Amino acid sequence: MKVRDVIKTKDDRIVTISPEASTPEAVARMVENNIGSLPVVEPDGRLVGIISERDLMRELHDRGDRFAGTMIRAVMTLDPITCDIEDDVDAVMGQMSERRIAKIPVIDRGRLVGIVSVGDVVKLLYERTRAENDHLMHYLYGPAHA
């Protein structure tokens, strides 16, 4: 299974933020969209980083009252780990597990086309396994057992 198969199951909308935005803007965008991280994208569409809830919590802890004046560029993770839309899902899951990251930006020909989470992959694998199981049960025992 390829990363493109996971991307096809998701909404096309990608919520991003500029490196020039403030940390409160990132918090607001994450809350509004019920997400835990944001790709940081330059005006030309180039992915330059990622900001996560963890990054924001660290910044709040370290800077306290100065948190609101901090720009995303100062706290984002530079050059985030990415995957290509044609990568094998097993390889991407291995990379996510090794590096302990829950979400990974997906690139296609140099452009950000989505984000894949561990949950997205687990959901797709579960659905495929369930469909295969139903098919086998139908094959072995007939429609009454599927």
Image: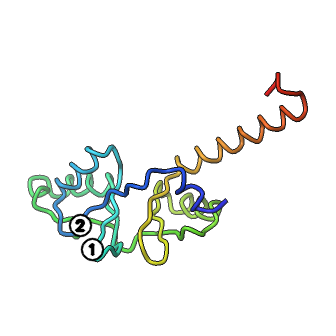
Distance between the alpha carbons at the discs numbered 2 and 1: 6 Å
The residue shown at (27%, 73%) is 42
Quarter containing the N terminus: bottom right
Residue 100 percent across, percent down from the top left: 50, 57
The residue shown at (26%, 44%) is 32
Examine the image and state in which quarter residue 13 appears.
bottom left
> Amino acid type of disc 1?
Glu
- Left or right relative to 34: residue 143: right
Q: Is residue 99 above or below residue 142?
A: below
Q: Residue furthest right?
A: 140
Residue 28 percent across, percent down from the top left: 21, 48
> Amino acid type of disc 2?
Ser
The residue shown at (80%, 38%) is 135
The residue shown at (13%, 53%) is 64
Q: Which residue is label 2 attached to?
A: 18
Quarter containing the C terminus: top right
Q: Which mark is residue 31?
A: none
The foreground one among 109 and 29 is 109
Mark 1 and mark 2 in contact (Cβ < 8 Å)? yes
Residue 41 percent across, percent down from the top left: 30, 69
Residue 3 percent across, percent down from the top left: 58, 62
Q: Is residue 43 above or below residue 60?
A: below
Q: Earlier in the sequence, mark 2 or mark 1?
A: 2
Q: Is residue 133 above or below residue 99?
A: above
**Helix, strand or loop for disc 2:** loop
**Helix, strand or loop for disc 1:** loop
The foreground one among 84 and 74 is 84
Q: Residues within 10 Å of mark 1 (few under 14, many from 20)?
A: some
- Left or right relative to 68: residue 93: right
Q: Residue furthest front?
A: 143
Q: Which residue is label 1 attached to?
A: 42
